[in-house]
Amino acid sequence: MFGYVSFAQLSTAIRSQLYTIPKDVDLIVGIPRSGMVPAYQIGLFLNRLVCDIDGFLLDGAISHGHTRKLGVSLTSLRQARHILLVDDSIATGGSMQKALARIKDSGYAGRISTCAAIVAPSHKSSVDVSFITMPQPRLFEWNAFHHACVENACFDLDGVLCVDPTAHDNDDGPRYEKWLANAIPLFRPTLRIGHIVSARLEKYRSLTEDWLAANNISYGQLHLVDLPSKAERIRLGAHCAHKIRVYRETGATMFYESNLGQAQEIATGSGKPVLCIDDMTMVMPGASHIAATAKSALWRLRAPLGLAKGWVKQQLRSSRTPVSGS
């Protein structure tokens, strides 16, 4: 089962533990690309300049907005006396060590503190600063559509790979067929999707396959609902039953679902986690979405109390989202 961190959780964890960052840090240096996510959050919270490692090594131009005055003013990047070298996570520690070696080999004589926002328990001591301790496997909001788990995952279609149809377009007739052919893409996974699981009807398979091909979305199998009409699908309540069955039978390890209500039902029915795209939260199987995600925040993230409380509040707000979509 995957541990999960969203942008919101990451921001909350950093904000609640800013005191762990040395007070004399005067420049934040991120390791591209994912390391720039926590690097900019830290830089904004501390009101410090932020750059990537290549910009620092080249002593590139300093640029920042003029809305507020910086906490530390630098005339050049390498003038910084104490830098915080930041990555989003540590798996083996290799990326951090390579980045650290590059800076030291450049002749930089200042102090370097290392930071990985998310660390495995076995690598917590590998960096000076971290905010979330989480064992592998793990998934982050910023890599969710490009993570290796995509290849063994089930993906909802409408609301995930493309925008949802409007009520006007979703007439199970000519307007819907036109919409299917011209649906606007939403998220495009980098890797081959294991299974696309949609409540679309089998009679629209050809139009759906054509759209997927036209948008260069690679996948293993396309699972649609074998019923004659939208009305019959609604009468039988086939949306979630279809998705739960495929999720269980395929042995997939993750389901990407657009709608929170359906995500809850799929998680409960399958006994497996569901990533809800509407609010980018991980819905865990259990008695309720709120209870499961609260438990996940307290146990899986092992975060400070402030993060856990913020996470529960976020889920209480999310639980008010009405159920809709396909």
Image: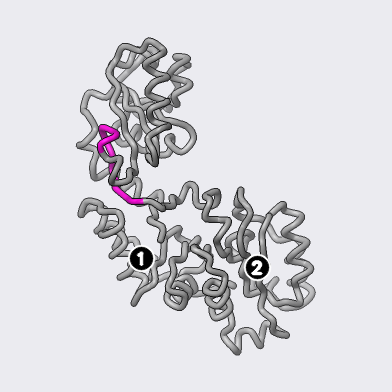
Residue 267 versus residue 324: which sits nearer the camera? Answer: 267
- Identify the residue shown where x is 33% and y is 43%: 119
Q: Residue 102 in the image: state x and y as whole percent.
A: 42, 19
User: For the C terminus, which image quadrant?
Assistant: bottom right
Residue type of the residue flagged with mark 1: Arg
How far from the left and from the top, in percent, is residue 212? 72, 59
> In the rendered view, does 252 fall on the left or right side of 123?
right
Residue at x 67%, y 65% (from the top left corner): 221
Q: Residue at x 79, y 68 (%)?
A: 206
Q: Is residue 260 above or below residue 151?
A: below
Q: Position of residue 63 (x, y in %)?
A: 45, 22
Q: Is residue 152 magenta?
A: no
> In the visual, does 65 lie left or right of 196?
left
Residue 243 sits in quarter = bottom right
Q: Tag 1 or tag 2, which sits nearer the N-term?
A: 2
- Viewer can see residue 33: yes
- Residue appearing at x 43%, y 28% in the figure: 65
- From the image, tell me which residue sits under label 1: 317
Residue 314 horizontal/vertical position (percent): 34, 61
Q: Amino acid at mark 2?
A: Pro
In this picture, which residue range is highlighted in magenta? 125-135
Q: What residue sits right under mark 2 in the picture?
A: 165
